[in-house]
Amino acid sequence: MTAGLPRPPAGDAEATTHRLEVRGLTKTFVATPALQAFDLTIAPGEVHALLGENGSGKSTFIKILSGYHTPDPGGEVFVGGSPLPFGAPDSSYDLGCRFVHQDLGLVESLSVADNLSLTTGFPTRWGTVRGRELRRRVAAALEIVGLDIDPHQPVSALSPAMKTGVAVARALREDDGRAAGLLVLDEPTATLPVEEVRHLLEIVRTISARGIGVVYVTHHLDEVFELADRVSVLRDGQKVVTTSVRDIDHTTLVHHLIGRGLDEAHAASTALPVGEDVVLAVADLAAGPLRDIDLRVRAGEVVGIAGLTGSGRDTLLPAIFGAVARSRGTVRVGAGARPVAGPRDSIAAGLVYLPADRKLHGGVMSLTARENLTLPRLGDFWRAPLLRRRAESSQARDWFARLDVRPADAAERPLFSLSGGNQQKVLVAKWLRCSPTALLLDEPTQGVDIGAKAEIHRQLLAAVAAGAGAVVSSADIDEVVALSHRVLVLRAGRVVAELVGDEISVATITRESLGSGAATQARAA
Amino acid sequence: MSTRRGLRLGFDRFSGLYLWALFIVVFGIWTPDLFLTTGTLHSVASQQAVGAIVALAVLMPMAAGAYDLSVGATVNLATILVTVLQTEQGWGMWPAIGVTVAASLAVGVVNGFIVTRLKVNSFIATLGSASIILAVQSIVSGQSQPLPPASRAWTQLTQREVAGFQIIVLYLLVIAVLAWWALNHTPAGRYVHAVGGNVEAARLSGVRTRLWTFLMLVTSSTLCGVGGVLYASLSGPSLTFGGALLLPAFAAVFLGSTQLTPGRFNVWGTLIAMYALATGIKGLQLVTGVQWLADIFNGTAVITAVAFAVWRQGRVVTRGRDATRTVTTSEEPPPDPPDPDPALPEKSPEAAASVQ
């Protein structure tokens, strides 16, 4: 046990000292309250899930805690029983608050040991790093999070969950006797592959077992039930509820989150009749790790694609669209007899593709939302010698109103200034505007809040109801289950299972992905 | 580009105009007899016209995310070529101009081929081609400065007066209006900005990214050809002036990207920056009489412009958050901080600048 770490409370007297106690915290931005009279207590060893859509005030709270924002007068925060001076990052650190953000801030090319030492400094004698002392400290830091890895390997060689673990270890490590008492994890699983989430949850459990209080911010409700002791929900800057996780169920939690019941997309999707016409036919496709892919999508049908990292799932849709080179195979769209190749060709034929990474491949962040919307088929507005700006703007307003893109004047803002969910809505609108025959959607709701997710699903199903076909590839198995008429499971570059109707469930998909499902077994026999 | 987006940014997007006005006021008070004359106005306007055309030549590929460092060499080659063809080969003025502009266009085709087909980074590709062009110029000129053509039509090409200005200023305006139209009011311009913003996202949206990069590099060299011809007519042939145009052109383009529609390379911002800097240099030269001021001024300007652009980018992101909050009503929750950090992955002008 490392000296700097607190032990779990021994008696009642200590148990009353909360790791964190927040009373009546309010923060107003230019007359708009971002956080109102917020109360929160976190006991030693408690994992407290903090939920809320984008803009609900979670980030504001975290930034007050870290000393970035100064709250309105009147609120109080106690960390480990001591009052927290506001607007002072150093005192927040001294009192034991530690933060791990979605962007971990690790230097990929450096070793685990170096990364762990960068913030607190290397132990040195006469300017030379003391190897043995460094190894001792690194081992101690890794032990806190229960990570058994070679500290000399570069961070880039680690799995995503392990990287998060290293970031957590770095945040919690001893530093001149200033012990960590509270850990804030801001959406640690947002970009983790599904099979890695379990590993991360294990790390969090190890930490809380040491008596550290954990504030766990997430969009994933499953993790709340699996991990948290208590849960608080923020909506529009106000705390809606704080409750023990045992006393709440999934549906109630969703209701608290968005203030209304969430339409279950699945019912809507399976109720849609699938047409007869094939809108997308992929034959004998090979690209990257993928082999022998055959896929036919009919009008009105949603085909889900599931598969773990490394299954080739992330290559499938780009290969069908022609964004990456195919080594074999043909793709035909609609009634067109001619195979399509390459993005321009595909788009012209009515096949559109929403990339998984909206910053790198999806949007042109420096252009306005309107310019992103109209980038494909911009010619519609060209009446020589000028682009008809008014027609373009009015169409942009219509689309953004239809998808509830916020803020109201989003059309003329550069895309980078919108929140992630709204950026994604803009990019979905961009392709729906082209009235596609077939849609390829890669991680359509990654890093998007639950309201935006529901809106994107609604729009997708509306397009499908109108006669389009869709292929949805997602690491979020719930999403695949909710949307799909049919699910293809990929493993090692091949389709290992095709599930329809009642076979479609999270359990079945997970089993097939791991290679222990019925279809896989049958194939082996 | 919308004006609404910019208004939120306060008046920093007009800072170039204010700077320009400040120069005029300061030097107007300091040395009114020399500075506040129509002669100064006319001479600054026409002396900078070729520089401004070269700046527009830099701007076009820059909007598509490609550097053209060969502009100085191309302008110089065009000047020598159009002169040699007339005085040493005895060609007529128009055939000489036609061949010179065509040769400059060919330079752009080669640049475009190297960048889009051989996939050499544009910075390196045009740095290399500039050196080759310089060698070609030496071959054409035989290392000695050719005599200027004697015909009156040749000098009248740029020096004829229109409303007190030499007609070259009018040429610049025509080119600027065409460039502005192409970049801001045609699908082509939108595609070019999309390629400059995020080439992969543009490609996946069906934009012909290589075609637009290629065409912008060709446009750049062709404009340089025109600029070189005009320079020869205005000032006579010179073996070395081209190199001195490179830095002012980039300074104007980067400074211009902080003006009018901040964050986007644009035509009028570039011209404002060009003339604001030129006015400052002219004023200082009148006051002090030293020649090296221009070099200091342009060097400072290009660094300041890029530093300013980076700083402004950070501010737009943070101010964007607060602005979002002010417009939202109670039933509309204010969006979370915008997704990206100030360091954007795309080639915004700031990012493009930091490449160096």
Image (cartoon, coloured by chain):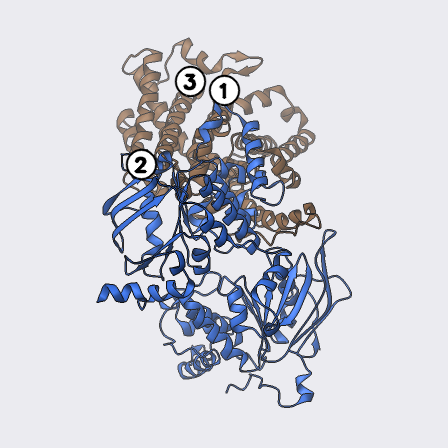
Chain colours: A blue, B brown
- The quadrant holding residue A82 is bottom right
| Dot placed on the residue nearer the N-terminal end, 1 or 2 | 2
Say which residue label 3 marks.
Answer: B233
Which of the numbered marks, if any, corresponds to residue B129?
A: 2
Please tell me which residue lies in front, A319 or A154.
A319
Point out residue B152 in the picture as x, y percentages from the top left corner. 42, 9
Q: Is residue B323 left or right of residue B176?
A: right
Q: CA distance from mark 1 to mark 3?
A: 18 Å
Which residue is at 34% across, 19% downward? B82
Label 2 neighbourhood size at 10 Å, few (<14), some (14-19), many (20+)? many
The kind of residue tagged 2 is Ser
What distance separates the C-alpha of mark 1 from that of mark 2?
29 Å
> Which is closer to the viewer, label 3 or label 2?
2
Q: SS of the residue at dot 2?
A: helix
Picture layout, residue B162 above or below residue B286: above
> Which mark is nearer the camera, 1 or 3?
1
- Chain of the residue on which disc 2 is drawn: B
Dot 3 surroundings within 10 Å: few (below 14), some, or many (20 or more)?
many
In three-dimensional space, the C-alpha distance between marks 3 and 2, rounded to whole angstroms, equals 25 Å
Q: Earlier in the sequence, mark 3 or mark 2?
A: 2
Q: Do callouts 1 and 2 point to residues on the same chain?
A: yes
Question: In the picture shown, does residue A143 fall above or below B190?
Answer: below
Taking the image as drawn, is residue B88 in sight? yes
Amino acid type at circle 1 is: Val
Residue indicated by mark 1 = B174
Percent x, y of residue A341: 29, 39
Which of marks 3 and 1 precedes in the sequence? Answer: 1
The chain letter under disc 1 is: B
Name the element at disc 1: helix
Q: Residue at x 52, y 46 (%)?
A: A425
